[in-house]
């Protein structure tokens, strides 16, 4: 297990994921009833983009670093970005936030006193940082265990409303299969929960097979969102990323129709920016 998110924090794929995470949390907070968030692969929580790793990776420059000037982003998209941008905070003269918020920081900021969150992280160093960041927050439990086991043990939550974020490092070749199998089992125990599975697109054909398997799985209300910033190049830099969303808020599809083109315009490395928004399975 070598993956360290520090090299990638704040890149376009992180911004894409976190923008939609913030939208779903904002939606859940519309009702007074408490909800639970389970983040199966939480990472450290927040990232210093001036660290050696972040500077060496430099990926944030073509991600959050492009958010210093949002003047060409239309008003509707800017309004939808607001919950995310409020958590990120001001960018400095180098287009860097004081600390780039990972999913745990975004969740921490957008849950209310009555809500609860469970963060799982397996890497010892990332877990030590994660626990250090949230040990004083009684709403949050940090668990040093395999996120898929944490998910199995955590559903259905007693709140009966909420969101599961599955954001694995995709270090192993069969991560899709493992993640999907964990998601299906969790869904069988908690069919009304919202689920978000993040993925990188390295092999478009493999992704198409995966989408077909989901379509044939019998699960309903499955939305697939993708953002591409360039053409896919074998062995090249990550250029396309996506989210599989199960039971997304009913407004999310419309919001994605506004947000995805705005993100593609912001992050495109060439004229090859592209988006995808499709219901793999409907009602
Ligand atoms: C893509 S990063 C997570 C980023 C985080 N969700 C965010 O948005 O800020 C993936 C994380 O999963 C951790 N990890 C790898 N395998 C794991 C497992 N089986 N269970 C829990 N965490 C794992 C890695 O150490 C890494 O911190």
Image (tube, rainbow, N blue to C red):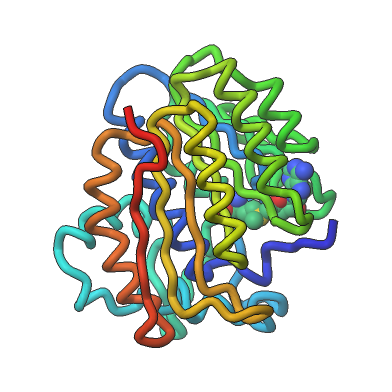
Rendered residue at 61%/48% (across/down): 167
Asked if residue 66 is positioned above or below residue 148 in the image, the reply reads below
Location of residue 84 (image quadrant): bottom left
Figure quadrant of the C terminus: top left
Residue 243 in sight in this render: yes
Q: Residue at x 16, y 68 (%)?
A: 74
- Residue situated in front as seen by the camera: 114 or 30: 30
Q: With 92 as the anchor, is 146 left or right in this view? A: right
Q: Nearer the viewer, residue 140 or 136?
A: 140
Residue 125 vs 52, above or below: the answer is: above
Q: Is residue 51 left or right of residue 79?
A: right
Q: Residue furthest left?
A: 75
- Identify the residue shown where x is 71% and y is 29%: 150
Front position in the image: 180 or 261: 180
How many numbered callouts? 0
Residue 36 in the figure: left or right of residue 137: left
Q: Quadrant where the N terminus lies?
A: bottom right
Residue 129 appears in the rendering: no
**265 over 37 or under it: above or below:** below
Of residues 182 and 218, which is closer to you in this image?
218
Q: Determine the residue positioned at 66% across, 28% down.
A: 151
Q: Residue 172 at what x, y percent from top left? A: 78, 55
Q: Position of residue 271 (x, y in %)?
A: 35, 86
Residue 282: which quarter of the image? top left
| Drawn side of residue 142 relative to residue 31, left or right | right
Extreme residue in the top direction: 158
Position of residue 157 relative to residue 41, above or below, is above
Question: Where residue 62 appears, x then y in whole percent?
Answer: 47, 80
Q: Position of residue 48 (x, y in %)?
A: 61, 68
């Amino acid at each position: 297990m070598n993956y360290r998110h520090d090299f990638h924090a704040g890149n376009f794929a992180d911004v894409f994921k976190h923008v939609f995470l913030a939208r779903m949390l904002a939606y859940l907070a519309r009702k007074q009833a408490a909800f639970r968030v389970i983040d199966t692969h939480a990472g450290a929580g927040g990232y210093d983009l001036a660290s050696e790793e972040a500077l060496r990776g430099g990926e944030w420059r073509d991600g959050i670093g492009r958010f210093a000037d949002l003047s060409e982003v239309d008003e509707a998209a800017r309004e939808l970005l607001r919950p995310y941008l409020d958590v990120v905070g001001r960018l400095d003269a180098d287009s860097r936030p004081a600390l780039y918020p990972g999913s745990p920081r975004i969740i921490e900021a957008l849950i209310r006193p009555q809500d609860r969150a469970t963060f799982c992280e397996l890497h010892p160093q990332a877990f030590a940082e994660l626990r250090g960041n949230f040990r004083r927050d009684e709403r949050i439990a940090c668990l040093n265990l395999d996120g898929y086991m944490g998910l199995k043990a955590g559903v259905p939550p007693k709140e009966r409303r909420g969101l599961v974020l599955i954001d694995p490092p995709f270090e192993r070749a069969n991560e899709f299969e493992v993640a999907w199998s964990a998601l299906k089992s969790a869904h069988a125990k908690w069919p009304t929960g919202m689920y978000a599975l993040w993925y990188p697109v390295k092999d478009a054909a493999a992704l198409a097979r995966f989408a077909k398997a989901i379509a044939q799985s019998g699960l309903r209300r499955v939305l697939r969102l993708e953002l591409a910033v360039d053409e896919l190049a074998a062995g090249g830099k990550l250029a396309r990323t996506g989210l599989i969303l199960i039971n997304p808020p009913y407004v999310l599809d419309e919001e994605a129709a506004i947000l995805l083109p705005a993100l593609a315009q912001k992050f495109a490395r060439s004229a090859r920016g592209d988006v995808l928004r499709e219901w793999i399975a409907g009602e």
